[in-house]
Amino acid sequence: MSNRPDRTLIATLLAWSLALTSLTPTTVLASNPGCPDAKLFSAKLITDICWACLFPIRIAGLSLFGGSVPAGASRQPACLCNDGGGFPHPGLTISFWEPARLVELTRAPGCSPTLGGMRLPLGSKRLLGTSGKADYDSGDGGFQNYHWYAFPLLFLLDLFVDSRCNRDGIVDFDILYLSEIDPTWNDDELAFFTNPEAAWLANPVALAACLGDAAAATAGTPLDTLFWCAGTWGNLYPFSGPQGTLGSRARATSLSLTRALAALHRRGLARRTMGDDAVCKAPINVVMKKTGYKISMFYPLPETQRAHVIGESPSFARIPSTTPPSRRSSPPALEPIRFRSPPPGRIPPRPLPSSPAH
């Protein structure tokens, strides 16, 4: 009788081991040439990041070092934010460009270079994407799936930011969204129901206005008033993956990322992190503020010197567009850098030992 519990435990563990062994080949496949390993968690966290893109840093309304500040950023020197118990706490505002999210674009559904080249059990052959083959016109279409990751780099490396200044609650790497389970991403008609304003934006006057946004974005300041435009990359609508292949691969992947950002904002899954009303909390903004983001490529060719704004010409931004032959099948990983104030944007005084933590 004394050995029965041990035998039961051994049998249970053996059953779980057999179950996991049988699931492993079908649920997650190992890295292979069609789904390479981006080696995210390696020395690349230091060497392949655009650290100069964090500047300027604004503390109490004063800018340190050079760099661009969005027009809608908060200029308040101080703030008064409530803690979880509703008690107000004073603090100083601090703002900077924060690498907080990571987006990978892949033609093969479920392929994740960010996760070491794993193939997740997502989608089917009908979701297989393509970069298109049209070199001189838009006669052929392109499509890529996207994976949206939480990537709070400064928290992961324990740099600069106090954990109490992070109201979105994300302090670790995590999967936030997968387009393979979103039927609107591969169907323009279904996507229309999430962005019905596309009906009155599909006219020659609205499209012609995007020329102004293209010029402004190439100069470094996209126009938030022309929210339906993505500068030189094309039209932001519909919020779906299919698109023409006119232009470089860098333009196509940047447009896919921007459409994904716009769709996530529309659903409340991405929030605005700059502005006076974002000092103590990150409000939902169903229309994305283009000036609140910059984009930097992490893989396969990292942008380590500068980031590009939404809609900026790949030629002027010097976005890597010529991929070595050994990496032409590599799905790109792009890093949206958001301007935070900081969300929520305060450096509160540290509580005394006798004070409740907040």
Image (cartoon, rainbow, N blue to C red):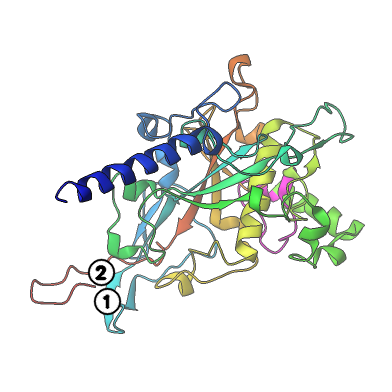
Asked whether the beta carbons under mark 2 and mark 1 sit within 8 Å of each other, the answer is: yes
Q: Nearer the viewer, residue 43 or 218?
A: 43
> Crowding at label 2, few (<14), some or many (≥20) Cα neighbours within 10 Å?
some
Disc 2 marks which residue? 348
Write down the quadrant of residue 125 in the picture. Answer: top right
- Can residue 158 be seen here? The reply is no
Q: Which mark is residue 90?
A: 1
At 26% across and 47% down in the image, what residue appears? Answer: 9
Picture residue at 20% right of the left edge, 69% below the top: 349
Q: Is residue 214 magenta?
A: no
User: Going by the image, does 174 lie left or right of 238?
Assistant: left
Which quarter of the figure has residue 171?
bottom left
Q: Nearer the viewer, residue 240 or 306?
A: 240
Q: Residue furthest bottom?
A: 86
Secondary element at tag 2: loop
- Residue 194 in the figure: left or right of residue 349: right
Location of residue 220 with respect to 32 vertically, above or below: below
* Magenta region, residue range: 216-232
Number of marks in the image?
Answer: 2
Image location of residue 13, percent across then percent down: 32, 43
The label on residue 225 is: none
| The residue positioned farthest toward the left in the image shown | 354
Evaluate whether residue 113 shows in this view: yes
Q: Is residue 10 above or below residue 323?
A: below
Q: CA distance from mark 2 to mark 1?
A: 6 Å
**Kind of residue indicated by mark 1:** Pro
* Residue 213 position in % (x across, y down): 73, 52
Left or right, 181 with reference to 272: right
- Residue at 79%, 50% in the rendered image: 211
Q: Position of residue 288 (x, y in %)?
A: 62, 62
Identity, as a three-letter code, of the amino acid under mark 2: Pro
Q: Is residue 137 above or below residue 266?
A: above
